[in-house]
Amino acid sequence: MMRLHICKSVPSATALLRSVPARIFLFFLVFYVLLVQIARTTYYRDPSSAFFDPETGYLPRYSHTRSEQADAFIDQVNSGELVPTHSSGDADICLGFATIARNGARYFKTAVGSTLEGLSESERASLHLILFVAHSDPNLHPAYSEKWFHDVADTVLLYDHDKVDLNRIVELEQAQNKLSGIEKGLFDYTYLLKACQATNASHVVILEDDVVALDGWLHRVREALDKAESQTADLGRSEYLYLRIFYTEEYLGWNSEEWPTYLFFSLIATAAIWLSLVGIRHRVHSSKRFLSNESIAVITFLCMPLLIGLFFACGQVSMLPIAYGVHDMPRFGCCSQGFVFPQERVPDLIEFYESRHVGYVDMLTEQYADDNQELRWAVTPALIQHVGSKSSKGDDFHTNSKYQRSVAERIWNFAFEMNDPEALRAEHLAHLEAA
């Protein structure tokens, strides 16, 4: 008799399924599984997402196409099939590359070619291209002996023996410690900045030698500079420090320091759903049979937390994307692959870099900006991609490296690879026609 009494007191599975709260939760689970599957096939390129797939995310789709276009351009110059145009002498943008030879990798040719391929004569004339071979003996760099290198450059920059302590450069080159490499890297960056400053161009673009620029990068830079100027004025400021044309989304995910904000808005969303359901039950009498206290509890305290969890799992880059255009980026901007500096700010940075003597360019630049409360603009989408898997600073791969990739490989703009080469070329041509 006792066993029969216990069985009667426990509701059967059939009875549970007949209850409205159980049906609501069952239908929600089916819907939720569908949402998870959609998320898996949608957010696999977002490094801030739980559904991120590194094998696909790091796949060089557009950068591979653009590299082929860049290499074809350089090959045509090297063979004499194409005679490149040069600066008109009153260029308003100085484009500078500093390069050193890397063991087992050659990115420099592609980097330079990607900034020149597709430019009209007028666009090329507006650029003063400086190629800086950062070796005490420039012949150590394979590009220096190649025809294209001298043909495309407006200025081939080498160490000036009268202005540079060449013995110190040799010491830094031969030293095997990391600190010497950091010191030389900062010296080279400063040396290139000085060379660009001497051209009197209104803006200075410094790119690393292992990047790829998208087709039409120059007109997008000009548009971004115009917006940066106007937005700076709108803020009542007279100047800004730089325009960033590259960043990696890897550092733009959910920030653990902001968990109180996330919790606050999650509670607000949950409370809004609860109040809405209670309000509907109060105003729509026919809904009372569906919106019992138990049903509202299931929706509010089971369904909503699962949806909020899925929202965060999809990643901040996807759920709260940065709007296209020019925007302030005072934090999490990485790294120094591509900066555009107004001419009037170059002396300030040169002085600061020289006062520090040793340090990474990106970190020192951010330190200067923080100390002086500088405006820092960035453009979205990014205009260049970092393709160098072999760092000029040495091998940084370890067996426990994230995604089994080196630090250099993870400096990657994932959205860049979604560019359509035909659409970019059409946009570029349309801009040239309008101009």
Image (tube, rainbow, N blue to C red):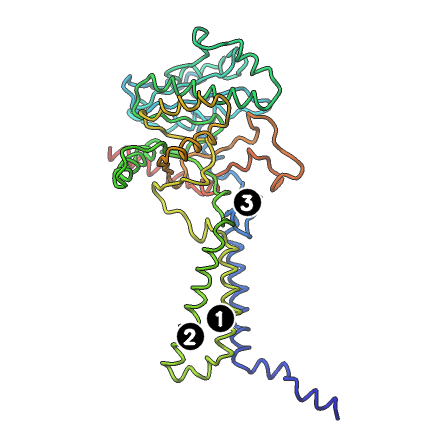
Is residue 356 at all visible to an observer of this figure?
yes
Horizontal side of residue 231 vs 100, given as left or right? left
In whole angstroms, how far apart are the C-alphas of marks 1 and 2? 9 Å
Q: Earlier in the sequence, mark 3 or mark 2?
A: 3
Relative depth, front residue between 421 and 344: 344
In whole angstroms, how far apart are the C-alphas of marks 1 and 3? 36 Å
Quadrant where the N terminus is found in the figure = bottom right
Q: Are marks 1 and 2 in contact (CB under 8 Å)?
A: yes
Horizontal side of residue 227 vs 104, given as left or right? left
Circle 3 residue:
56
Q: Amino acid at mark 2?
A: Leu
Quadrant where the C terminus is found in the figure = top left
Is residue 121 at all visible to an observer of this figure?
no
Circle 1 residue:
300
Outermost residue, top direction?
162
Examine the image and state in which quarter residue 220 appears. top left
In whole angstroms, how far apart are the C-alphas of marks 3 and 2? 41 Å
Q: Earlier in the sequence, mark 1 or mark 3?
A: 3
